[in-house]
């Protein structure tokens, strides 16, 4: 199996906040151009890669959705050269003070900065002594106030700037593993399919705005109208203070999610295939909304039978998310083998049970 780590690290070093995904889309497109028959951009910026099947036209198609957008921040106000910020997507504010960031300035420059927390004595009494709300945090670029006013405007984006870090145990840590880890898994799948015959067309999709509106999955599913769909995303890994039934060990396998957004027939088929291939897996039960691209794909048009495959992720929505590279590779292999197993009349066999 090809080493996916260099490509994954390259994605973790690029911005691409929700609604502003162009920088990461370019990186993914360059990679996918070598693995699919054609690539295109949707009207809202999602990347579509089509790998044609060998079946008789018109062929059925499967859509694999992996969102490429990232959480981040936006400048909300400028005071004496310091930048006030607000969040783009959901951020765990406890980890923001001290974070390294890049300010994507209106001047066209990318300014390095750090998020700072003012001393308690300088904050209003209502700020309290605990975790500060994001509105009390500031970004310091080191520039004089007059230079900041010339370069930075309200609405400029602020992204995490820490570089990916390889930890012991084949663990990778970085600020956008949710969900660029799934883009890497889909890339593993496409590489595996270079040497496998598959009847169905494959739509590899890097969606936009999953963190804010699910826009990319809604619009791509509506435009492509696949017969079935699979979303790939991170789930909660076990770690400090996270050991309940909703968490799973890293490096021990892939998650097969079951709940209202997932079709039980597809779930059963993926489970059977994982057992056959001896790919370790765990059951992730989601009793309500999955908060992934599975939901918008499932509810598009007349409804699309959808599954959700996951990899465990520690420290979700922080700058130091962590995953086991082997789990990403396992997801990619399972996707490829499932696609290769699809027969022309598979859709006719789908039943709700």
Image (tube, rainbow, N blue to C red):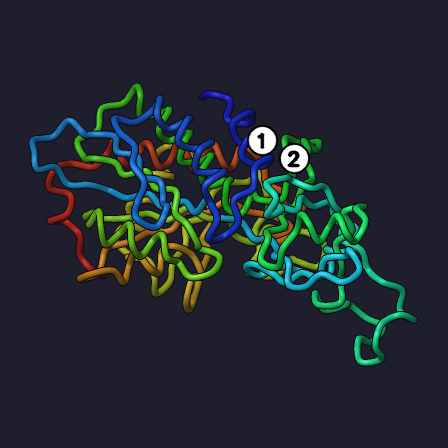
Q: Is residue 82 left or right of residue 298?
A: right
Using the rendered view, name the quadrant where residue 28 is placed.
Answer: top left
Q: Is residue 325 left or right of residue 206?
A: right
Measuring 15% from the left and 36% from the top, which residue is drawn there?
343
Q: Is residue 252 left or right of residue 189?
A: right
Q: Alpha-carbon distance for marks 1 and 2?
A: 6 Å
Which residue is denoted by mark 1 in the rendering? 9
Image: 320 above or below 277: below
Residue 227, x across and y down, in percent: 19, 48
Q: Which mark is residue 164?
A: 2
Q: Residue furthest bottom?
A: 126
Using the rendered view, name the quadrant where residue 323 is placed.
Answer: top right
Q: Residues within 10 Å of mark 1 (few under 14, many from 20)?
A: many
Image: 136 above or below 103: below
Measuring 61% from the left and 44% from the top, which residue is drawn there?
107
Label pair 1/2, CB-CB below 8 angstroms: yes
In depth, the one of 141 and 328 nearer the eye is 141
Residue 267, x across and y down, in percent: 32, 51
User: What SS does tag 2 mark?
Assistant: loop
Q: Quadrant of the N terminus?
A: top left
Measuring 33% from the left and 58% from the top, which residue is drawn there?
262
Q: Residue furthest right?
A: 121
Q: Is residue 282 left or right of residue 340?
A: right
Q: Which mark is residue 138?
A: none
Measuring 56% from the left and 30% from the top, which residue is drawn there?
10
Image: 100 above or below 328: below
In depth, the one of 115 and 197 nearer the eye is 115
In depth, the one of 292 and 216 nearer the eye is 216
Q: Residues within 10 Å of mark 2 (few under 14, many from 20)?
A: many
Residue 345, x across and y down, in percent: 10, 41
Sequence-earlier tag: 1 or 2? 1
Residue 116, x across and y down, in percent: 80, 55
């Amino acid at each position: 199996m090809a080493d996916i780590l260099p490509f994954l690290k390259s994605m973790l070093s690029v911005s691409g906040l929700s609604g502003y995904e162009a920088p990461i889309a370019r990186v993914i497109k360059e990679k996918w151009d070598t693995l699919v028959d054609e690539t295109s951009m949707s009207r809202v910026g999602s990347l579509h890669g089509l790998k044609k099947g060998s079946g008789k036209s018109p062929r059925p198609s499967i859509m694999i959705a992996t969102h490429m957008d990232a959480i981040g921040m936006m400048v909300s106000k400028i005071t004496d050269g310091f930048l006030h910020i607000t969040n783009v997507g959901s951020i765990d504010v406890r980890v923001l003070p001290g974070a390294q960031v890049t300010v994507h300035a209106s001047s066209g420059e990318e300014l390095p900065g750090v998020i700072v927390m003012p001393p308690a004595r300088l904050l209003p009494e209502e700020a309290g002594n605990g975790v500060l709300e994001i509105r009390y945090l500031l970004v310091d670029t080191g520039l004089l106030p007059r230079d900041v006013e010339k370069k930075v405007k309200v609405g400029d984006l602020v992204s995490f700037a820490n570089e990916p870090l390889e930890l012991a145990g084949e663990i990778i840590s970085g600020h956008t593993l949710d969900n660029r880890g799934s883009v890497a898994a889909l890339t593993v799948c496409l590489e595996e399919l270079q040497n496998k015959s598959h009847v169905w067309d494959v739509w590899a999709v890097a969606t936009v705005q999953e963190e804010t509106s699910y826009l990319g999955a809604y619009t791509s599913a509506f435009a492509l109208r696949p017969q079935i769909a699979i979303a790939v995303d991170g789930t909660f890994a076990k770690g400090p203070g996270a050991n309940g039934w909703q968490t799973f060990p890293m490096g021990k396998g892939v998650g097969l999610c079951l709940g209202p957004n997932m079709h039980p027939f597809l779930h059963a088929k993926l489970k059977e295939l994982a057992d056959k291939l001896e790919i370790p897996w765990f059951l992730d039960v989601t009793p309500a909304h999955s908060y992934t691209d599975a939901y918008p794909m499932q509810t598009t048009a007349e409804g699309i039978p959808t599954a959700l495959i996951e990899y465990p992720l520690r420290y979700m929505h922080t700058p130091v998310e962590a995953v086991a590279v082997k789990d990403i590779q396992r997801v990619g292999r399972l996707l490829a083998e499932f696609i290769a197993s699809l027969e022309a009349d598979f859709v006719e066999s789908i039943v709700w049970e």
